[in-house]
Amino acid sequence: MLRMKIPFLLFLAFFSTSTTGFADDETTLDQTVRGVVSADENKRQPQEGGDAQPEPPPPPPTDRRETDPRMNELWDSLQSMQDEIKRLREQQEVRRRLEITDEEKKAQEKEILQAAGREYTTMKKDTLGLEYNFNYQYYSYDIISQATEVERHANHNLTNSMYIEYAFLDNLTWNLNMPFVYKWDKTGTDQSISTTELDDISTGLQYQPLRSKEGWPVVILLGRVTFPTGQSPYEININEELATGNGYYSAFGGLSLSKTIDPVIAFGNIGYTYNFKDESLSQRRNGLELTGISPGDSISGSVGMGFSLSYNVSMNFSYQYSYQMNTQYTWREIPKTDSGSRTSSLFYIGAGFRLSQKYSINLKVGIGLTDEDPDFVVGFRIPFQFASDG
């Protein structure tokens, strides 16, 4: 009997010392073996001398945590570890829910670029887009009419445009812009001229030749033709009327670039505008007759960056520059004359607000940096898109 119990009790002694880690191994093992031997001898003595005495009932089991304070410390440590693991799991679940998917990230980047300008994005195939655009420009300048008299000129231009676009393919979008202009020019304190007319209509294409790849900028080719549908500055009475258009055809070609550089998106564009000459004019200017004009071509470019402030708000900053070459005028009475080149430079601050999953509004404020530019520009755009069910 003793031989059978000793291995079992040795195993219990080893398990007890290895799990608690607080008792001395040799002392515990020795006490356990002696206890087993004593118990076995006590059982044998009554059997040898006479009647066997009944074995006393075993003592009720006790919780070691009640008798050993070190077990309480271990238990408290385990509870603390479990609480900490639970808290970390809850934090990990919250982070997982806050992280946006790749599709959501691409949609957010597209909204930032759309707030910066139409030229940086295309639409999905068979999508129709409509956009209302309002733009206000203010010009002010002084003219010395006499030796002791200076006239103050203030020009207010309000443009309402309807912009239509349709995606023939995922990477090819056609667009049409129809602007209506209200102009009010005030001279001094008592003279003013105003007009409300259609501005120059333009139509164009945006084509993305290559799919966007990680590490490479998105390239979109741009093309646009402008028609002289507005009131030409070379066909009006310059003392009584205001022009709303340029008065000649023009063709624009260029490209736009955009690239995500966390946490911002960098964008820019460059283009060249070819202006067609018009030799069929007949306008009186300062006692002379203007019979033709050859407007100078222009080079333009812009650069900027945009970033997201939240899921529904984004901001962008951009700088725009353009240079127009000399313009040549043809007169009936005198030889041809040339005007000097022109430079335009503006700085823009913009913001985009997503009102819902389908609707948003984009705001922009610009400041002119040269004498040829407006003093300031304020505008907003409200785009709508209608996707085909097919």
Image (tube, grey):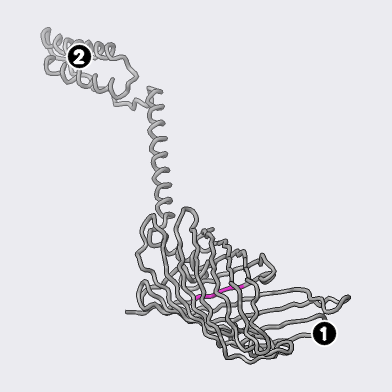
2 or 1: tag closer to the N-terminus = 2
Please give left or right for residue 177 compared with residue 379 in the image.
left
Please give left or right for residue 154 compared with residue 369 in the image.
right
132, 292: nearer the viewer: 292
Query: In the rendered image, is residue 225 in sight?
Result: yes
Q: Residue 79, position in %: x, y? A: 39, 35
Residue 180: quarter of image: bottom right
The residue that mark 2 highlights is: 36
| Vertical side of 325 occupied by 228: above or below | below
132, 193: nearer the viewer: 193
Under circle 1, the secondary element is loop
202, 215: nearer the viewer: 202
Which label belongs to residue 257? none
* Amino acid marked by disc 2: Val
Under circle 2, the secondary element is helix
State the separation of the CA atoms marked 2 and 1: 122 Å
- Circle 1 packing at 10 Å, graded few (<14), some (14-19), many (20+), is few
- Circle 2 packing at 10 Å, graded few (<14), some (14-19), many (20+), is some
Query: In the rendered image, is residue 178 in sight?
Result: no
336, 275: nearer the viewer: 336
* Amino acid marked by disc 1: Asp
Q: Which residues are magenta?
A: 379-383
| Vertical side of 357 occupied by 287: above or below | below
The residue that mark 1 highlights is: 190
Q: Which residue is depicted at the point 68% across and 89% down?
A: 333
Please give left or right for residue 193 compared with residue 69 in the image.
right
**Quadrant where the C terminus is found in the figure:** bottom left
Q: Residue 272, position in %: x, y? A: 50, 71
Q: Which residue is depicted at the point 51% across and 59% down?
A: 308
**Quadrant where the N terminus is found in the figure:** top left
